[in-house]
Amino acid sequence: MKRGTLLIALLLIASFIPLTGASEEKPLVVASIAPIASIVQDAFGDAVEVVYLIPPGANPHEYQMTADQIELLRSADVIVTTGGHLPMEKKISELKEEGTITGETLFFDDYREEGFRYLPEHWYNGKDNPHGVWLDPYNALAIASAVEKALEKADPVNAGLYRELYSDFEGRVRAIVEAYKALVDENRTAVIQLPSNQYAIEWLGITAVASIKPEEEVPAIAVDELVETARGADLVIYAVDSPEQMKDAASELARKSGKPLAGIRVFWSEKPYTEVLIENSAAVIKALGGERQEAGNVQENDVGRYVVLSLVSGIVLGVALGVILKK
């Protein structure tokens, strides 16, 4: 009798213990760089596990994967690249083609179907610019949309959840875009420090007319050679995470041309994509208003001011402001 009672008790206890299995595991998403990982994490949150390969501070154009990272890719459900131009991403493409990795692997063609675009380097023969593509919010949405579709394939049981999470992310990004685009007049131009900076400003309607360093493989142009071009532009853009020598060049160009200087962030980790989008946009808007910045400082305290300004101007709906500040 006691044995029967004990057996029933054990069965009752077991019925309340959740079973763990593959169906309860989060999909593993591996991104090539941290900013791409931040897009995925911001869009899908706790529904996925996100890691990235290239450590902060490493040169993405020279980085080579380790054996452990290749093993990580073998277990990934979704692999997200910047488009495929980095040497490490080309290696990922080779591993995919030979069958070493089997997860959903996303490249330029996958993003292009969702609206992704390369901008032409106006200052360098009009070639496609593959650097910093994630800084353009429309590209970020294209990447997130492609990831959403890949997650549906990898985990169809939770397809509805991924669609809902992407829709929320899209709403937040588009609200930010509308708020800041409303503050920029037409036909604005800028001299940028690096090709990647182009993607942080052209969606706002600011054309990059010259770059201190025209391309990855091309030496930087002397500041004095760019002064006249900068005088005809509205501002100078630099990356706060760039080498000190490049920061100094941008600062000198702004000083000699008399134009305001705006610092943006190109690479980051452990920060939501939408937060960096707001910070970068606020820095650019502040500079367009004539407020100068010192190279090396990130302006983060004026976000509310400029979003509120767009609302007061009667251009952006209050619901959009609420979405932005909620994040």
Image (spheres, grey):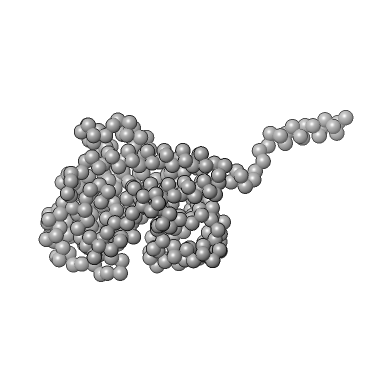
Displayed quadrant of residue 267: bottom left
- Rendering coords of residue 186 (x, y %): 18, 46
- Rendering coords of residue 44 (x, y %): 46, 43
Q: Give the farthest residue toward the right.
A: 1
Q: Quadrant of the N terminus?
A: top right
- Rendering coords of residue 141 (x, y %): 38, 47
Vertical comparison of 137 with 101: above or below: above
Confirm whether residue 149 shows in the render.
yes
Displayed quadrant of residue 88: bottom left
Residue at the image position 54 percent from the left and 61 percent from the top? 101
Residue at the image position 17 percent from the left and 49 percent from the top? 187
Q: Quadrant of the C terminus?
A: top left
Vertical comparison of 40 with 212: above or below: above
Q: Give the farthest residue toward the front.
A: 113
Vertical comparison of 93 with 295: above or below: below
Vertical comparison of 291 with 212: above or below: above
